[in-house]
Amino acid sequence: MRTIRTVIASIIFLTLSVALCAQDNKARRAQLEKEIAVLDRQIRETASQSASALTQLSLIQNKIKARQELIKESDKQIAEIGEQITVRQKEINVLTARLDTMTTYYGRLVRNAYKNRDMRVWYMYILASKNISQGFRRYAYLRDLSKEMNRQAAKILDLKMDLEKEKAKLVDLRAEAQVLRSSRVRGLQELKSEEAGAKKLSDKLKKEKAKYQKELSSKKKEAQDLEREVKKAIATTKKKSVNVDYTLSGKFAENKGKLPWPVSGSVIARFGKQYHPVFKSLQLPSNNGITLAVNKDAVVSAVFDGVVAQISIIPGYHQCVLVQHGNYFTLYSKIKNVYVKQGDKVKTGQKLGTVDTINGETSFHFEIWNEKTTPQNPETWLRPM
């Protein structure tokens, strides 16, 4: 019995551990599927509105990365379900062994009771006792025999029910694994198609290199204009220093890595220097923040308490909202329908506006700066997706 209890305890521990991993895995899969859906919608929209091939290529490449990660997560989940199936099978084996033991014991009880079913035999058994004490013991044994048989029968029924539940869970797990395998096969097929689309766009870019170099020059100028305006706005705000709660600086810094995302989407351009996906030696405009592919008219929210320092219009970035958090600043770009005005105090999660669609592209640009006009990598400040 001690061995059986040890096995059951081990099975329970393994079941809980695997279940927790499975929950995390499902959450990550759901997030990746959501990202892929956003990117897929963006790819269709940019294709229909003749956005730049570079934009489309960036979207497709990010979709390929998300798809590859989704396939990896599917592999993990399939493996985890395989572990759960093994655990369930062990539990079924333990329950089956216990049921066999109890059924055997119960069978003996029933057979003994049947052989001695004549009440005269019971009376003779009690009367043949050597003394009164033994007689009472024999009487108690016969009295409790029926109760014991009923208890054993009830335990056997409970065990049978537990066994059927475990078998049903096993069937469900095997069905879930099959669904995941089918989904993985479809994912691999879609990945192959997406990679072919990326190659087609790469070939197109190679044929029209001069055209896209000119386009990149224009984007670099837009990025430089944005950087200049942000630095100017921060310098101007520092001089005014009106209605600024500088205690927010410490609170903002304490929340590094915990800030909420300003909008839901998929990161398509990361912080810092990046190079062209086709012309490897060609540097793209330096990114002082991150750019996300988002749904049309996605709502943008403040990542922390602060004051709206400035609202400006910058070519390529449409309306930009700069929010001050003491010695830190957050920039929300490519906005339309701005819901706030300069000087407004905002709270974490407060809506600032909606994302605009520019040249067939619905993307949101976000930056974080400190008072020394040094851009920060937003992904180190925002909570993990």
Image (cartoon, helix red, strand yellow):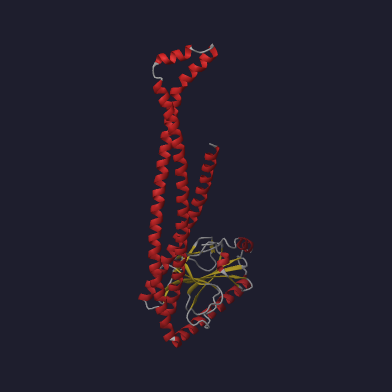
Relative placement, left or right, of 368 versus 119 is right
Q: How many marks?
A: 0
Residue 330: x percent and y percent?
55, 68
Q: Residue furthest left?
A: 48
The image shows residue 145, relative to residue 292, as above or below, that is above
Q: Please tell me whether residue 183 is drawn above or below residue 175 in the rendered image.
A: below
Residue at 48% x, 53% y is 83
x and y percent of residue 341 in the render?
A: 50, 68
- Can I make out residue 360 in this image? no
- Tell me residue 118's x, y (percent): 39, 17
Quick one: 257 or 21, which is closer to the camera? 21
The one nearer the camera, 333 or 159, is: 159
Q: Could you say which is closer to the camera, residue 188 or residue 209?
A: 188
- Image x and y of residue 58, in percent: 45, 75
Who is closer to the viewer here, 56 or 107? 107
Q: Quadrant of residue 44?
A: bottom left
- 147 sits left or right of 130 in the view: left
| Camera sees residue 238 | yes
- 359 w.r.t. 303: above or below: below
**Furthest-bottom residue in this view:** 210
The answer to which quarter of the image holds residue 288 is: bottom right
